[in-house]
Image (tube, rainbow, N blue to C red):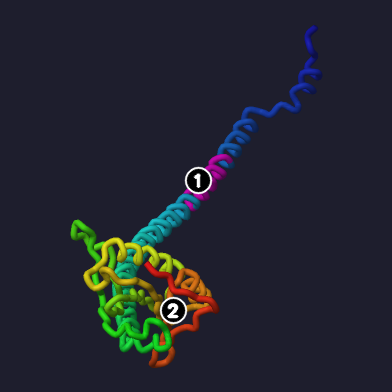
Amino acid sequence: MALSAAERAELMKDVPTLEEFWAAHIKTKQEWEQQFKQSREDWEQQFKKLNALFDRVDKQIDGLGSTVDRVDKQIGGLGSTVDRVDKQIGGLGNSIGGLVETLIAAKLWEKFQGTPYSRLKRAYRRMQVFDDTNIERTDIDILLSDSDLCMAVEVKREPDERDVDAHVKRMGLIRKYPPAETKGKTLVGAIAGGYVPGEVRDYAHSKGFYVLELSGETVVLAEPPAGFRPREW
């Protein structure tokens, strides 16, 4: 059924005219372009900020690399310093050990007055012990000797129980491969130190060793426990 003119007019009253549609289109296009322009500017600003951030990070990484290089050099230098200090301490330790040995060796036999070993008046230092193939097996810090008796003295700055055990093994080697001065003689042993802890002194006595210790400028023979008998090899 055909619409009347009035009905067509009623239906078309809300439909925009071509001019209105085009004007709306132009407005929308301008708004979209403005939004795009603003978004692009915002993105460009963010991109610049991001690039600046990357530049700072790169510089920090470069600086960190230089810092690492400096630290590596410092650590390398520290290693050399530690090596020098180790050598100096080692040399100092050897010097102190030699001093302790020298102090203890001086008239050591006098410390055994009143014992069966008071006649040990010949003293030898750093006596080497060789096996049957002429290979050095051990050495004796101080050897006290008489016609039928000798005493091997091991000297340490501060002996411990391991030093006592090592001296037990050393005594066996001396007996097995006796130097000329010990052949055919009764062999006994002693532990001596700049300082001998009480537990080490007791342990050495339990192994049959006499114990000597520096006290001020002199050497003191530690009092053996009741019933002590020196071990003979």
Q: Identify the residue shown where x is 36% and y is 85%.
A: 118
Q: Quadrant of the C terminus?
A: bottom left
Q: Where residue 156 appears, x then y in whole percent?
A: 38, 76
Q: Main secondary structure of the magenta part?
A: helix
- In the image shown, does 214 or 6 lie closer to the viewer? 214
Query: Magenta span covers which residues?
Result: 32-45
The disc placed on residue 211 is: 2
The mark nearer the N terminus, 1 or 2, is 1
Horizontal side of residue 156 vs 137, given as left or right: right
Q: Identify the residue shown where x is 44% and y is 79%.
A: 211
Q: Which residue is mark 1?
A: 40
Q: Secondary structure at mark 1?
A: helix
Q: Secondary structure at mark 2?
A: strand
Residue ranking furthest to the bottom: 217
Q: Which quadrant holds residue 68?
A: bottom left
Q: Which quadrant holds residue 179?
A: bottom left
Q: Identify the residue shown where x is 39% and y is 85%.
A: 112
